[in-house]
Amino acid sequence: MIQALYLFQIQSKELIYYKNFQSVEKLEMFSSFFSALQSFVSELTESSTESLNTIELGEFFVLITRVSEISSDLVIIADKEDVKEVQKMLPKINKILLDHQELFINWDHTPEKLEIFDLTIMQLILSNRKLVGDSSLTTDQSKILKSIWDQKGSLSEQIREDLLKEREELNYRYLAEENYLKKYEISQKLIEISEKLHDDEKFIEYQTESKSLKDEIKDRKLRLHYYLDKVIESLRFSRYAETYSYLYSFCIKLVNFAESHFVEKYKTLTKSLLNRKKVSRDEFRQVIKAISNIEAEINEHLALDI
């Protein structure tokens, strides 16, 4: 099976085209792994020549072919048992590339222009049933990572020591951090350091944790959307008791996304709703106005896309 196909410009090493034959779910779940793989593949093209290079990668092979006419390197990752079949298909893939060479020579970074080329490539690969299957790069994720790092060479003791210290400090911050957005940023750094340390166990562990955290952020954002919509709706009909309840729930959910002064500000507005009979009419108008502006304020300062 063909696992992935890349096309890099020779001079800039810029990725022009990329097709991964994994499921969307796996692409999302193992995004850090595929990013590390793409980075490695990009590095491989730096030493490629006009002849075909074949590099073993765990249970897979990486085939690199120089396509001089479009100043690009074609890179294909395939199962070991399918390498000969892929090599037979290479002339057909090259022909498609040459048929679309104007697209790559004058490419203006507009992805839409690659759509016809993408469809043609897909039709060619899917026409060969031997190259379409259920195997997955992620099944041997640990082996592939080790294979990549073995080819990159070992780290010096000093660099390794510094990276281990940095990771330990970041891990402590990660465990203590309550802001989910900051926590996610730290998780990405932990993945990056684990990759540099050639530590496949921690890389996979942090990658899994990061995916779980990303899902949690998505879920909590939906809840924030829900409660804020309810706040605005109840406010429109002057149902202040409902507004109080929804705004209070919104504040609780916002704790994991915003700085404390934002949360406290909205909690104060919530209390003003509860004690509306004890404040002046002008002051209450200001409270209503402030609540009405929460959505705009949140989007401006917190980038939550609410």
Image (cartoon, rainbow, N blue to C red):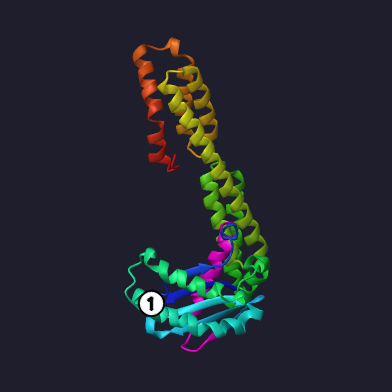
Q: Main secondary structure of the magenta part?
A: helix
Coordinates of residue 293 in the picture (x, y in percent) = 37, 30
Residue under the image location 49 percent in, 82 percent down: 92
Residue 11 visible in image: no
Decide which of 168, 20 is in the foreground and name it.
20
Q: Is residue 48 magenta?
A: yes
Decide which of 72, 39 is in the foreground and name it.
72
Q: What is the three-letter code of the residue carrying label 1?
A: His
Decide which of 80, 122 is in the foreground and name it.
122
Residue 115 visible in image: yes
Q: Is residue 8 magenta?
A: no
134 up-or-down from 212: above or below = below
Residue highlighted by disc 1: 100
For the record, the magenta segment spans 28-53
11 up-or-down from 294: above or below = below
Kindly state the secondary structure of the residue where label 1 is placed. loop
Residue under the image location 58 percent in, 44 percent down: 216
Give the side of residue 303 with respect to residue 187, left or right. Answer: left
